[in-house]
Image (spheres, rainbow, N blue to C red):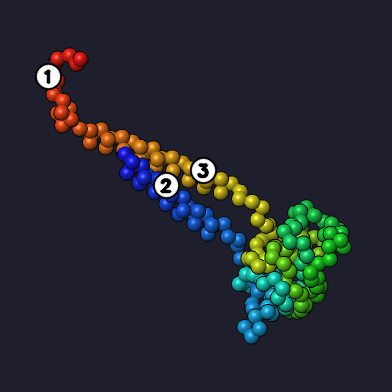
Amino acid sequence: MPGNFRIASVLGVVIILLTLIWAGSASSHPTVSGFRPDSATGTVEWLNVSTADTLVFGIAAPSEVTPGDTVHLVVTNLGSDAHTFTLSSVAGYVFSATASTSDLLDYFALNPPLVNVSIPGSVGAVVTANFTAPAYGEYEFVCLESGHFAAGMSGILGSGEPGATTSVDTGPGAPVFIISGTIVGLVIMALVLGFVIGKRRGSEDEMSPERLGYPEPAQGSPRP
């Protein structure tokens, strides 16, 4: 029985480790922001952004900038609508989906953006700017043209970590609790199975009375 219990315990630990590894790989942020390190210096990066009449930002891969690096921003307009690229300076802050243009302007008046460029409303217009990559965290960027943010023209810039869409990591969420519950259930099942198997093996290995030195009682004779 002790041997089977140990086996069941080991199986439980293996299940926990495999599940944690899977959960860690599944919880990584999606890649949407794009930066290219300068191979000569390693301290200058390029951020290539496009805007479109569909009111979306297009940003090239790969994913993140290094805090403290100089970032060369290049914004190219693929459509005929005017836009802005306005990057918040507050890590982890995400605007409410119901925020109006006036709300955004009030916020940036109190919290000056890391970069704020206006893109002319003509196909092929290019605007450039430089800014210093902020401290570790996620920073939202938006378009301040009237109605554009409400239509979904925003994103998350990752500094020291991958960016995301229009949301940041707010906690483990339901999937982690489901995974945790599954782990606990599997461990309990493994322990119960080990106990049952050990119980059966113990009864099979039990020594007969004759091997213990006691006579076998005759059939039908009462036991003392």
Circle 3 crowding by C-alpha within 10 Å: few under 14, some 14–19, many from 20: few
Circle 1 crowding by C-alpha within 10 Å: few under 14, some 14–19, many from 20: few
| Vertical position of residue 10 compared to residue 35: above or below | above
Circle 2 crowding by C-alpha within 10 Å: few under 14, some 14–19, many from 20: many
The residue under label 2 is 12
- Amino acid type shown at disc 2: Gly
Tell me what residue is drawn at x 64 percent, y 78 percent. Answer: 37
The residue under label 3 is 181
Q: Position of residue 168 (x, y in %)?
A: 67, 57
- Amino acid type shown at disc 1: Ala
Q: Quadrant of the N terminus?
A: top left
Instruction: Find residue 220 and report its image quarter.
Output: top left
Judged from this view, the residue extending furthest toward the bottom is 40
Looking at the image, is mark 2 or mark 1 nearer the viewer? Answer: 1
Q: Quadrant of the C terminus?
A: top left
| Vertical position of residue 27 compared to residue 112: above or below | above
Q: Position of residue 77 (x, y in %)?
A: 74, 75
Instruction: Find residue 69 and report its image quarter.
Output: bottom right
* Secondary structure at numbered mark 2: helix
The residue under label 1 is 218
Tell me what residue is drawn at x 39 percent, y 42 percent. Answer: 190
- Amino acid type shown at disc 3: Gly
Q: Disc 3 vs disc 1: Cβ atoms closer than 8 Å?
A: no
Position of residue 74 in the picture relative to residue 20 (left or right): right
Which numbered disc flags the more N-terminal residue, 3 or 1? 3
Which numbered disc flags the more N-terminal residue, 2 or 1? 2
Q: Position of residue 106 (x, y in %)?
A: 87, 59
Looking at the image, is mark 3 or mark 1 nearer the viewer? Answer: 1
* Secondary structure at numbered mark 3: helix
Q: CA distance from mark 2 to mark 3?
A: 13 Å
Nearer-the-camera pick, 101 or 80:
101
Nearer-the-camera pick, 94 or 120:
94
